[in-house]
Amino acid sequence: KFLKTKYPKLFGYLSYIFNFINCIDKNDLLFVTSWQAFFITILNFHPYNKTILLIQHDDDIILAKIFSLKRILFRVIYRLPIRKVTVSYWLKLYLEKKYKIDSIAISNGIDFSTFLMQNIKSKNTSSSYDVMCIGRNVDWKGFDDFLAACELAIKRIPNLRMHIVSSEPISFKTSVPFIISRPQNDKELFKLYSSADCFVFSSWIEGFGLPPLEAMASGLPVVCTKCGGINDFAKSGINCILVDIKTPSQISDAIFLIYSDLELAKKLKQNGIETAKEFTILSTIQKFDKLVLKPYFLK
């Protein structure tokens, strides 16, 4: 049960701590997915050597580039003698260079069998060319870049329509036709991937970047920014088209290239599916068991 505080907005993170601190049992091993969650384990008197920290991105990119308590706290966590797991080899090398810390790299994975079950093209019968993206309200996810790219692309693709998938309320202004979908579960999400013609991932920085891999598994040609973690699987001209971050014009050109070159689109689809097969959730579990869990329990 949650411990509820009367003033969650006033106390912010402190309220968050109190809401979750009593949910942590005295387990043999704790796997925390953020530096905030790590502090909760410490407040619950859980020992360092029984905690594993999953690092999904560099918080310096997300937090303001100013002095703040949050920046101090996550850097303290990085220095503590706990095991750290990064979600990509790119992120592992990035953090080693920037913070001089070591970690075990275990790439994210998808349930490819579920994607195959949904990978029966359900493209609607309308004449629109649907370009899909994940809509987010944070700047570094590059949603505004996607909007600007589509404003340019529709000049060459008159039937272009944006298919925006989002789990949160989003507001924007555009002259481009669009639809918004809010899937309630993975099954619905996979069907949405399969109904589109092209997928765009416009983030500025990512620890891994799972949506492009999901799109590949769904048989979609992918346009992706050079945002870091996608280096683990993205190969420009082979399974996707890579463009620079913050470049709507390059994104627009890539969309048009896929639209106009049917052979390239077919190549990206086929190679994307083969790439996705290499990053399954089963593979992730096996690596985690081998590199993280077994060494712990053999001690």
Image: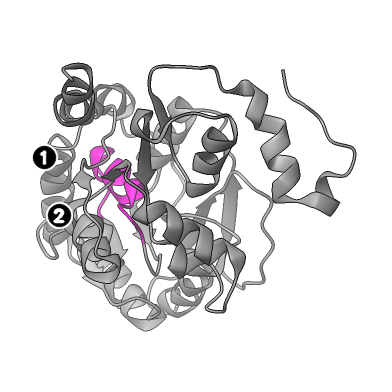
Image coordinates for residue 73, horizontal then vertical, percent: 52, 58
Circle 1 residue = 274
Circle 2 residue = 239
Q: Quadrant of residue 82?
A: top left
Q: Nearer the viewer, residue 100 or 1?
A: 100
Magenta span has 58? no
Of callouts 2 and 1, the N-terminal one: 2
Cα separation, mark 2 vs mark 1, equals 9 Å
Residue drawn at 57 percent across, 77 percent down:
67
Q: Which quadrant of the figure contains the C terminus? A: top left
Observer able to see residue 30: yes
Asked if 107 appears above or below 240 in the picture, the reply is above
Image coordinates for residue 76, horizontal then vertical, percent: 44, 57
Label pair 2/1, CB-CB below 8 angstroms: yes
Horizontally, is 167 left or right of 272 in the view? right
Image coordinates for residue 202, horizontal then vertical, percent: 39, 66
